[in-house]
Amino acid sequence: MNIPAFPLCWPDRFPRAKARVSSSFKTQLAGAIKNVQCSLKLFGSDSGKAVGDVVISSNCSLGVDNPSDPGVAVWFTWEGKQVCIAVDRYAKLEANLQAIHHIIEARRTELRHGGLEIIRATFTGFLALPAPAPKPWWHRHPSLGGF
């Protein structure tokens, strides 16, 4: 799947926030981006498994400091699987990005204390899998032995 950095590419399985709240983060956008990039690099190093194809997807473009949709989705591959961590809880783009940094740092803590299997289990919820294809109509029709 080719993920665009702009506009925001939100994963299908993640619900959007109904209301946004303010955060206590003091990080500016450039710092939040650097924190996410650094955390992903350290996560890859800690796990011994490369993190690749990183895309930070948002509705932020040059000249737009505060987009009306401040959601951020960080897409990457790890162990050959596409993973997405998406946050739109906060009213500011940089706060949502900083929250993703903290989520990645939490995975690093899990890795240190629980090992690689814990991380694999945790990342199952972040896998960016396509929705399962519906069964053909004849599998769903009661007179044809479906259901």
Image (cartoon, rainbow, N blue to C red):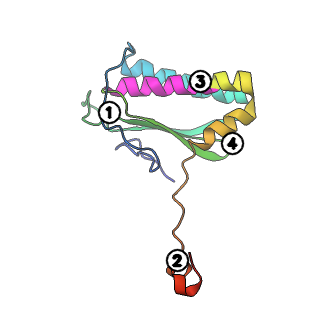
Which residue lies under the disc numbered 4?
79
Q: CA distance from mark 1 to mark 3?
A: 22 Å
Amino acid bearing label 4: Glu
Residue range in magenta is 92-107
Which residue lies under the disc numbered 3?
106
Neighbor class of circle 4 (other Cα within 10 Å; few <14, some 14-19, many 20+) is some
Amino acid bearing label 2: Arg
Neighbor class of circle 2 (other Cα within 10 Å; few <14, some 14-19, many 20+) is few
Picture disc at residue 11: none
Which residue lies under the disc numbered 1?
70
Total numbered labels: 4
Which residue lies under the disc numbered 2?
140
Q: CA distance from mark 1 to mark 4?
A: 29 Å
- The kind of secondary structure element at disc 4 is loop
Work out whether residue 102 or residue 36 is closer to the camera in this orientation and state it: 102
Report the predominant secondary structure element of the magenta stretch.
helix
Instruction: Indicate the position of residue 57 as horizontal and vertical percent values.
Output: 41, 39
Q: Quadrant of residue 119?
A: top right
Q: Is residue 116 magenta?
A: no
